[in-house]
Amino acid sequence: MSRETGLRIPQVYRFVLSNARVPTELVAEPPPGASRDAEGALLLDLLVDDGRIAALFPAGTAPETARRVDLEGRHLWPAFIDMHTHLDCGHAIPRVRPDGTIHGGFSLTAEDWPRWTDEDLDLRMEFGVRCAHAHGVSALRSHVDSETLAYSQRHWRALDRLRAKWAGKVDLQGVTICAMEAWIGPEARALADLAADMGGILGGVTDTLDRGENGTYDALGQALDRLFALAGERELDVDLHVDQTEDLSAFTIPEIAKARLRSGFRGRVVLGHCVNLSLMPPEVIDRTLVLAREADLAFVSMPTPMMYLMDRKPGRTPRWRGVTAAKEIRAAGLPLAIGGDNCRDAWFAYGDHDMLDTLKQAIRVFQADEPLTGSLAMASRVPADLIGRPDLGRIGANLPANLVIFQARSLNVILARDQADRIVLKNGRQVTDPLPQHHELEAALGLLDTAS
Ligand SMILES: [Zn+2]
């Protein structure tokens, strides 16, 4: 970010960020005596020492022994977590031209696979990570296209190279994405081993598996049983793509909950999308969420691409926002995170890996501003817990100083303006890398329009 902010973050190991305004829900343990503003933000001083937050103090009370930067009431948040991305598909425009439909997403991605060489993957995936880093995202989970073992190996190796290269800047974790049939197919064990070897976890797409002749989900049940068994043997979490459809007959949350309960699986189970849940009658939503709580399921919603994809009909304005039953999920006490999802690819034409933008979209689309407090953690604290990183996504003593400082002095202004002049700190050091330029990527990929 390059706009002048009037703030200088010292390049020293120990300094105090004083008079910061931090939303209470993003603070691990508020220090006694800290005052709160009208929007529920705490007024704090942070002592940063050797890349970590050494201690929190009520504003104006940090010891005078370290360099001091007066934030003058600016908002300070923990760095964002994007727990649902698709780095390997991303930034393929203009060679891929999405048609705005799920079906088009599948077929255009499959047409693009032969172009996914090592070099191509490295260029496009790193572009995505550079965007996220500049916007203040400290960890990313990416669904690795794993339709066949042969393709999968190339995609996982690309993520592994990126993970090694970006260690200490953006933490990367992979998860398999494949049709659920793969988990009852001959390559199931090899796919699970590959994900485990690469530090990843297991997933799949549940709503595309056809029902049997008797109308039941027997095959899905078998695939889920196998998936939970393979994940359990390897002590891996599970993260599924679920019910990304307006078809009410393709409703798999209850099948997943029942499979998890009978499996005895002890890891985390996250369900992504679940958009047709919001179209169900209220009693079905209630019943489903009771079952989900019993099965200890968590949810992640991707509001931006879902608004783009769902309820798209030629010549007709969409009538439905395309997102899950967010308020009901949260009211049921179940974790709900948000993710950026696809970015400039066959599924979603836009995006910039900016989780603040995703949070703003979520708050508007879910109407999650009544009250606003409680909603902010969807982009940091909740996803950090769901990816098994309780040291991230919050501000607290002895946690990494991965921070975002805004010019804004109120939540309203954060949500009103783009905050392109935010300052990002990673391990206490200011991130000075600029946002990467799209035309440079296009030149590297051989996609520049020479007529322009
Ligand atoms: Zn996805």
Image (cartoon, rainbow, N blue to C red):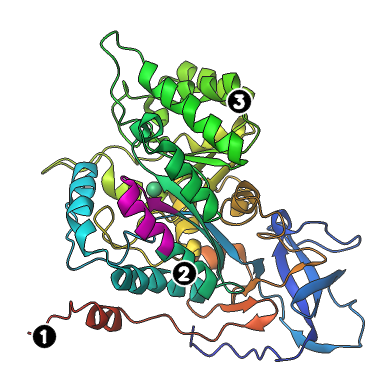
Q: Which residues are magenta?
A: 143-157
Q: Does label 2 point to a residue whose CB lies under 8 Å from ligand 1?
A: no
Is residue 365 left or right of 314 when viewed as pictured?
Answer: right
Q: Nearer the viewer, residue 272 or 232?
A: 232
Q: Residue at x 24, y 43 (%)?
A: 102
| Vertical side of 6 occupied by 423: above or below | above
Q: Which residue is mark 1?
A: 452
Q: Are marks 1 and 3 in contact (CB under 8 Å)?
A: no
Amino acid type assigned to the residue bearing label 1 in the image: Ser
* Labels 2, 3: front one: 2
Q: Nearer the viewer, residue 228 or 21?
A: 228
Tag 3, which secondary structure?
Answer: loop
| Vertical side of 92 occupied by 71: above or below | below
Q: Which mark is residue 161?
A: 2
Return the x and y of residue 140 as percentages of the image width and height. Answer: 52, 60
Return the x and y of residue 443 as percentages of the image width and height. Answer: 23, 83
Q: Residue at x 77, y 73 (%)?
A: 52
Asked whether residue 144 is drawn in magenta, I would say yes
Q: Residue at x 36, y 34 (%)?
A: 186
Amino acid type assigned to the residue bearing label 3 in the image: Ala
Sequence-first tag of 1 and 3: 3
Tag 2, which secondary structure?
Answer: helix
Q: Quadrant of residue 432?
A: bottom right
